[in-house]
Image (cartoon, rainbow, N blue to C red):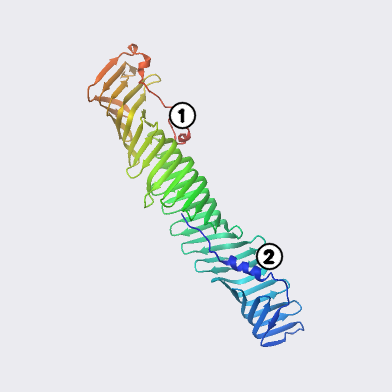
Amino acid sequence: MLQVFLPKYTLFGFLLLFATFFSTEAQDIQYNADSQTNAGAPHLTRLTGNVRIRQNNLFIKCDEAVFDNSQNSFTARNNVKVKQDEMVISADELDYDGNRKLGKFRKNINVNSQDRILYTEFLDFNSGENSGYFYNGGKVIDEKSTLVASRGYYYSTNSSYLFLDKVFVDYPDYDIFTDTLRYQLNDNLVIMQGPTRIISDNNFIYCEKGKVNTKTDITEFSQNAYIINSRQRLAGTKIVYDRQTGVGKAYGNVSMRDSIQNVVITGDFAEYTEKPESSLIAGHALFVQGEKGDSLYLHADTLRSEYNDDGSYKLLLAYRKVKMFRTDMQSACDSLAYVFSDSTINMHHKPVLWSDINQITSEVIKIKMRDQKAETMTMVGESFIISQEDTVHYNQIKGRDMKAHFSQNQLSLIEVLSNAESIYFPKEETDIIGLNKSESERMKIYLTEGKVQKILFLAKPKILLSPLEDVKKEDFKFQKFVWLDTVRPYKPEEVFNWTVY
């Protein structure tokens, strides 16, 4: 995340000193010079050679000046230097009105205070209106940064400052470009108003409103705000970043896009931590991976991501009300872990998965992916595979621990590793002819297009085919049978629909 701050002393400090400098009570100006002559009128005195002018603790030197006794004002020219406390102002010209407390500096102006220098050609301050103003361009330089703006204001009433028109701040690690930059001294706030770009070697930030707390180093971006780095784009209605803790938070219409891994995560709230790198998204959280039309959609109340040192995804954790949709596979569970290193999806707490016409439930389901497609699936604990023949008859496979294999993203082989049982309704053409119930220590079921083609019994099989009329309806199903078709998402947006099951 980007570390944004402004220098402690910049043009703000110079303008504040101007406010002190020109707000003294009006007093007669004292002066001396090597030569004092009449300047064409009784009230005008021309001063030349080693000119010295003073009002209160304000000291001015120049090569020549014309003093107006009737107005308590003067015009200074050539090598003008003004000193007050630690501040030194140099300029070619200065018009100073001691009664109105108005000073106008012109040409080759630089203001030096605590090793910060303001360069401009036009600088005014009116203490009666409590405002200062430079225009036609200005530049502030210190050891850390350079600030450039077309014009700027200072308002002492509320201790605020405003830079306008093509504002540019050059820091060693990044640059800021904006139209309007405001500083509120009492609140320690620097506020960007208008389109703003912050550019560094590591990322790019855009916003149309933003603020920086120079005391706490907390930065806030809003209005079309987003951050882009080499692989990700984070956007939100508001983005807040704490430089001291390295934690960033985004609020409202949040989206994180990873162009390398083709992932988009959206939600209402996001939190990003720099070290160790991780992120969390909550509120309508949605993870999408893949191309349009063949994408994986994963929703949960909360999504948490952990990253490798190179910034790639390491782990995705989904908590509460988890639903997943692909055109060839759907699932639901209470929590899920997606491990990117070996492309496995681990589903916990009442997981259910649908593949074509088959519903799969178990205590834990583990899916091994390859090229974003299911390759194998392991079912741990008591497991069921169910497919529907009609509203009354369901083909069922039951066992302790199973392993499924996929071909072209369809179930092709199911291995029941212990306590295998099945209920199967064989057909002649379209008519069900009976109920085939079988038991075996282990079993293999071969499928084509999701339908059972062959069952291989591997140990101590017991097989019984009974006419339907000889079977009680309560024996059509195993104990703990549950059909969850109302839970199944049939399109991407249905991952947000949650039904307790």
327 and 261: which is toward the camera: 261
Q: How far apart, in angstroms, are the residues tagged by discs 2 and 1?
A: 66 Å
Q: In which quarter of the image is residue 25?
A: bottom right
The image quadrant of residue 118 is bottom right
| Image quarter in which the C terminus is found | top left
Tell me the amino acid under the disc marked 1.
Answer: Val
Q: Position of residue 11 (x, y in %)?
A: 58, 67
Does residue 134 show up?
Answer: no
Secondary structure state at the residue bearing disc 1: loop
Please state the horizontal and vertical placement of residue 286, each as a whole percent of the image.
45, 40
| Left or right of 164 in this view: 436 | left
Amino acid type of the residue tagged 2 in the rendering: Asn
The residue lying toward the viewer, choosing from 193 and 186, is 186
Q: Residue at x 52, y 46 (%)?
A: 251
Q: Earlier in the sequence, mark 2 or mark 1?
A: 2
Give coordinates of residue 74: x percent, y percent.
Answer: 70, 78
Q: Is mark 2 on a helix, strand or loop?
A: loop
Q: Mark 2 near mark 1, Cβ–Cβ under 8 Å?
A: no
* 60 lies left or right of 499: right
Image side of residue 165 versus residue 489, left or right:
right
Q: Which residue is disc 1 drawn over?
A: 500
- Indicate which disc residue 130 carries: 2
| Residue 120 seen in the figure | yes
**Image point (58%, 62%), residue name:** 165
Q: Residue at x 54, y 65 (%)?
A: 147
**Vertical comparison of 83 with 430: above or below:** below
Task: Identify which residue, 415 or 208, lies in the foreground.
Answer: 415
